[in-house]
Structure formats: C-alpha cells, structure tokens
Amino acid sequence: MDDDEAAELARLRERAYGRTPDIAGDAAALARLRELEARAARRDVPAGDDAAAPEEVAPVAPAEPAAEAPPRERPRRRAPRWLVAAGAVVAAAVLVTATVAITRAVPEDTPRYPGAERVATLAVIDGGSAPEDSSAGRRYSDFRGYSVFAFTASNVDRPDVECLSVVSPAEAADDSLSVCGSAPFPVAVTAVVSEQSPDAARAAYPLGTALNFTLTGAGVEVWVGSR
C-alpha cells in the first residue's frame, strides 16, 4: 500500500468511525474501505503458508439521523428607543389635537352686538361733571372728540336710575345725547357720525357710521357698526 492509499484509507476510516459517520449511505466508499483495510491487514501479517487470512470488516451500520431539535423561540426584540420616543410624541400630538378640538367645540361668547366691532372700553377719569340735574356723576375718557359721562337720575316713577350722556363739543349742552336705562338692559347711547360730529370722529369714520356707547361694570364700551 502506497502513501496515497494510506491517506485514502485514513479519510474513509474517518467517515466510517469518526464523530460524524456518513459512509453507510455510500456503497462505493464502503467497498473501497473494505478493500483498503484488507490490504493493510495483509501488509501487517508475515508472509508464509500459515499466514492468517484477513478478517472481514464488519459492515458499518447506517447512522440514524439525529432527531431535529425543536426550533428555538426567537427572543422578542425591543423597539428602538427612537421609535418609542416617536410614539410618545405622536401620542402627545394626538392629545393636543383632541384638546384643541374640544376647545373649539365650546361656543365662544356671543358678541353684545353682532355685526359691530368693539373698538375701545373707556375708563373713569378725574375732571368734568355730569349734567346739573343729576347726582353721583363720573366722567369717562373721551372718544374721538366725544365726552362721555355717567350719572344717577331720580324722578317720581324711577328713583336712582343709571344714565349715560355723550356730548359733542359742537353741540349745546341741552342737545347732548343722554339715555337712562332700565334693568336688566344696559344703558346705551348711539350717535351717528355727521357733519356736526367732532372732527376726530369724522376723520376716523365715514359719515353715517353708528357709534354705540354702552355702560358696563368695566367701563363704557364703544362699538362701531359696519355699514
């Protein structure tokens, strides 16, 4: 047996007797293994008439296929931190959107005069006096040349009535616009911009514009009507 056959025998023996035998299903390799082992056995036995015959190689039992291991359950992968953070941002955005929607669903306060715009709220100032036939008078800030007063008037039928007076410097005191209220309605005076109106009012608004002065607890509200 030469070196090549010896190497071949070693490989076949590894396939037959090694850790992972696979020669049982290969008939040609199995026959070659028997042939090479027989040669190796004859080489090791001394020559002569009484030389023992080589022992037959017992057939290699086919290896039983290994039982397949049950598939391992893959560990659950945690979501990346950025994905968790993005989910939190989305949840927060949904919450904010829902809050805004609820806020918008709440009806806003109905304006006092639909179709008009409130342009100022006049506060009480020092100086000036109310008409002579009134008491507890107070003056408010001027508006576009108009002087504004509030006072309490009394008569037989209606004692201590709250009144409002809007005076234009171009008008006589007797021609001032004065109105006394009656609860629960607010006291209000409406003046229309005309040629006799103060210069500041005519410069700010076209002729025919309605200016409403309404007495409230916070002051005198000034409303401008749209034409």
Image (cartoon, rainbow, N blue to C red):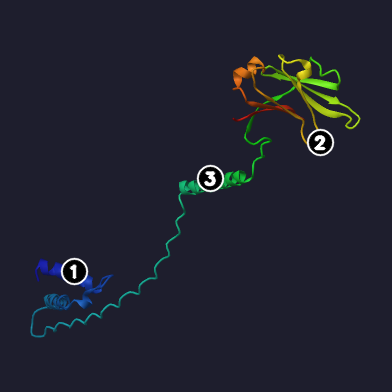
Q: CA distance from mark 2 to mark 1?
A: 117 Å
Q: Secondary structure at mark 3?
A: helix
Q: Nearer the viewer, residue 99 or 43?
A: 99
The answer for how far apart the CA atoms under marks 2 and 3 are is 48 Å
Which residue is denoted by mark 2 in the rendering? Answer: 183
Give residue 26's quadrant in the image. Answer: bottom left
Left or right: where 160 falls relative to 93: right
Q: Return the x and y of residue 166 as percentages of the image width and height.
A: 74, 22
Mark 2: which secondary structure? loop
Circle 1 SS class? helix
Counting residues from the start of the chain, the first of labels 2 and 3 encountered is: 3
Q: Looking at the picture, which amino acid does disc 2 mark?
A: Ala
Q: Nearer the viewer, mark 2 or mark 3?
A: 2
Local crowd at mark 2 within 10 Å, few (<14), some, or many (≥20)?
Answer: few
The answer to whether residue 61 is left or right of residue 206 is: left
Number of callouts in the render?
A: 3
Disc marking residue 11:
1
Q: Amino acid at mark 3?
A: Ala
> Label 1 amino acid?
Arg
Q: Farthest residue to the bottom: give it.
A: 50
Is 227 rendered above or below residue 47? above
- Residue at left 81%, top 16%? 129
Q: Quadrant of residue 32?
A: bottom left
Q: Which residue is mark 3?
A: 93
Q: Is residue 12 left or right of residue 71?
A: left
Q: Give me the C-alpha separation between circle 3 and circle 1.
A: 70 Å
Q: Mark 1 or mark 2, which is nearer the start of the sequence?
A: 1
Whether residues under marks 2 and 3 lie with C-beta atoms below 8 angstroms apart, the answer is no
Judge the density around disc 3: few (<14), some (14-19), many (≥20) Cα neighbours within 10 Å.
few
Q: Nearer the viewer, mark 3 or mark 1?
A: 3
